[in-house]
Image (cartoon, helix red, strand yellow):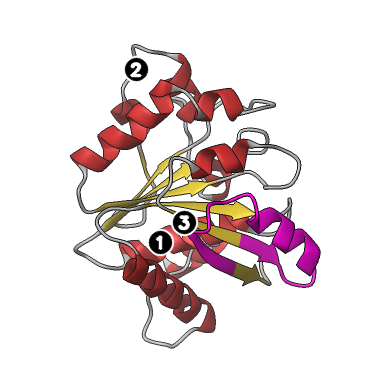
Amino acid sequence: MSPAQLEDRAIIYRSETARREVDAFRHLRTQLLSVTEGNFITLVAPVSRGSGGSFVARNLAAAVAFDETKSALLVDCDLRHPSQAQTMKLAANDGGLIDYLEDHESNADSVLYDTGVPRLRLIPAGKSRETGAEYFSSFRMRLLLDSLRSRYPNCHIFLDAPPVRGAPDARILADLADVVVLVAGYGRDTAAAIAQAGANFDPAKFAGVVFNEGV
């Protein structure tokens, strides 16, 4: 895709000109790689709706995909308000995560989509649901992530979670992840709200807070 197409999809890209946003995500990527081993699973969880968790998850995955020796997989786990397929302008006609979890005859390949960004793929959420807790704690969800890790040893998986406040979904997803990144809206989420959200996660997995000024 052209730079204009990538900007339209709110995805970072490499260029000859230094860009603050791109450098920030490269720095975050380096920090994650320094505290993890192998093809880790990262949960990206916003404190509240509008904090920009999906934007951060998408671009952390894109930053990993900059490296030609690695690939990234983004999984839209916000079942109430899925956004990744729409933002990335993908026609997810074959369904997504929910379709895989509900249909025990389906396989992961049927819900993996190329994004147009080299080495970056997406599993969209599929049909929206009011709650994801029972899906995320299911055997099928764990099987999906385990099979993807074993099949793609150089692929790093990013789970785009729903907001921490208001539902248990992000906390349940954290059990499946190796590392957790909390996203706070700069000037939006209070220090108390950030601390309360962070307390939901195992300190051994908690990588820190990203303050997002953008989308």
The residue depicted at 48 percent of the width and 46 percent of the height is: 159
Disc 1 packing (10 Å; few <14; some 14–19; many ≥20):
many
Q: What crowding class fits label 2: few (fewer than 14 Cα within 10 Å), some (14-19), or many (20 or more)?
A: few
Q: In the figure, 178 relative to 11: above or below?
A: above
Q: Quadrant of residue 68?
A: bottom left
Viewer-nearest residue: 196 or 150: 196
**Residue 106, label in figure:** 2
Could you tell me which residue is drawn at 41 percent across and 75 percent down? 26
Percent position of residue 106, x then y: 34, 17
Q: Is residue 148 left or right of residue 94?
A: left
Is residue 131 depicted above or below 18 in this figure? Answer: above
The disc, 1 or 3, on the residue closer to the chain's N-terminal end is 1
Mark 1 or mark 2, earlier in chain: 1
Under mark 3, the amino acid is: Lys
User: Alpha carbon of mark 1 to alpha carbon of mark 3: how far?
Assistant: 22 Å
* Residue at disc 2, secondary structure: loop
Q: Residue at x 65, y 69 (%)?
A: 212
- Asked whether, in this view, residue 70 is left or right of residue 81, the answer is left
Pick the residue in front: 65 or 191.
191
Q: Name the residue beneath numbered marker 1.
A: 62
Q: Is 181 covered by the magenta stretch?
A: no
The secondary structure type at the circle numbered 1 is helix
The vertical placement of 128 against 115, above or below, is above
The span shown in magenta is: 183-209
Image quarter of the N terminus: bottom left
Q: Is residue 184 magenta?
A: yes
Q: Badge 3 is on which residue?
A: 205
Q: Amino acid at mark 1?
A: Ala
Crowding near the residue tagged with mark 3, few <14, some 14–19, many ≥20 C-alpha atoms within 10 Å: some
At label 2, the amino acid type is Ser
Kindly tell me whether residue 189 is visible in this rendering: no
